[in-house]
Image (cartoon, helix red, strand yellow):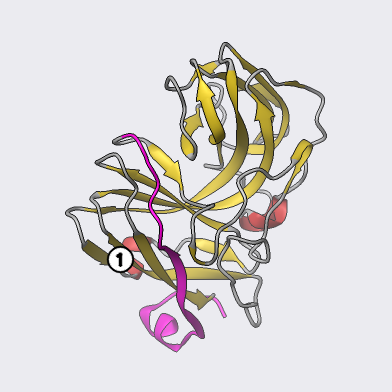
Amino acid sequence: MTITTVDGLVAAATQRNVPLVKTASRTSTAAGFFSVFDLAGSPGAGTLNVGNTANGLVPTDATAGYPTINAFGGGAAGLISRFSAYGSVPGNLLIYDRLFVCGAYAFNANTTGQTPTSFSSRVPGGTDFTDTQIWLEQVTAGTGVQNVAVTYLDQGNVSSTTGTVAAPAAMIVGRCFQLPLAAGDTGVQGVTGVVGSVATAGTFNILVVRPIWSGRVKIANDGDVHDYAKTGMPIIYADSALMMLVAPDSTATGIPELELVIANG
């Protein structure tokens, strides 16, 4: 059913207590976003190096490291109606659907002519790529300033490029940063090339993600709850690969814990 009222939300079938919980902490830099995908927890640790620099792959909830999402009866999508968040250190939390990943690329990668792998089944209507983003995820520690440029197909399937972006010096494992799209672009349909330069060591992944939720742990060992009004009830799919990024206020990611409630809508 389509959920259009609070009564409809109350009556909807739900999947409760979908976990994104980490039981290990990662060394970080204050205010920088870090992937915790490869750390122990529930779900268990994933693998940062996906081993595919040719055309990349589209992860799903069945891929190690992502929470399992039950099939939605009577519809292809669900709506996140509640987030419960906790953290042992203050900082910002982001949740994305990881639509696509390719890597791990060497610091001096020069890969062009990639055939984009489609992830259209994981965007609204199969055609709305609005707000999809490109991120870099550091797989092994870097030396020097990592410069990266990514060519991609934009929301209209037109070739474009991020331009060359300089990462923070000496990137440590798990560090992530967003690459700005070209002026006028609002989304990404696929990655067609990756070029790295300047750095002298290190490897990285390139991600295409769709934003789902953002929140903040204000003080250590604190949390927050966002109901349907605060979450905005973003759409996810039965095969969505939900990932968490943490931007702690200190030099460790701490122990972040999230639980989701998904309404069948």
Whether the magenta-drawn stretch holds residue 246 is answered as no
Could you tell me which quadrant the C terminus lies in?
bottom right
- Residue furthest out toward the bottom: 11
Q: Amino acid at mark 1?
A: His
Q: Quadrant of residue 224?
A: bottom left
What residue does disc 1 label? 226
**155 vs 51, nearest the viewer:** 51
Residue sitting at 63 percent across and 69 percent down? 238
Q: How many marks?
A: 1
- Residue furthest out toward the top: 198
**188 vs 109, nearest the viewer:** 109
Could you tell me which quadrant the N terminus lies in?
bottom right
Mark 1 neighbour class, 10 Å CA radius: few under 14, some 14 to 19, many 20 or more? some
Name above or below for residue 83 compared with residue 167: below
Residue sitting at 61 percent across and 77 percent down? 70
Q: Position of residue 54 (x, y in %)?
A: 80, 34
Residue sitting at 29 percent across and 35 percent down? 30
Q: Is residue 51 left or right of residue 167?
A: right
Q: Position of residue 64 (x, y in %)?
A: 64, 61
Q: Is residue 159 left or right of residue 225?
A: right
Name above or below for residue 139 compared with residue 128: above
Q: Secondary structure at mark 1?
A: strand
Q: Is residue 130 left or right of residue 25?
A: right
Name above or below for residue 243 compared with residue 130: below
Q: Position of residue 170 (x, y in %)?
A: 45, 22
Residue sitting at 60 percent across and 46 percent down? 48
Q: Quadrant of residue 191?
A: top right
Whether the magenta-drawn stretch holds residue 25 is answered as yes
Q: Which residues are magenta?
A: 1-29
Q: Position of residue 188 (x, y in %)?
A: 63, 37
Q: Quadrant of residue 205?
A: top right
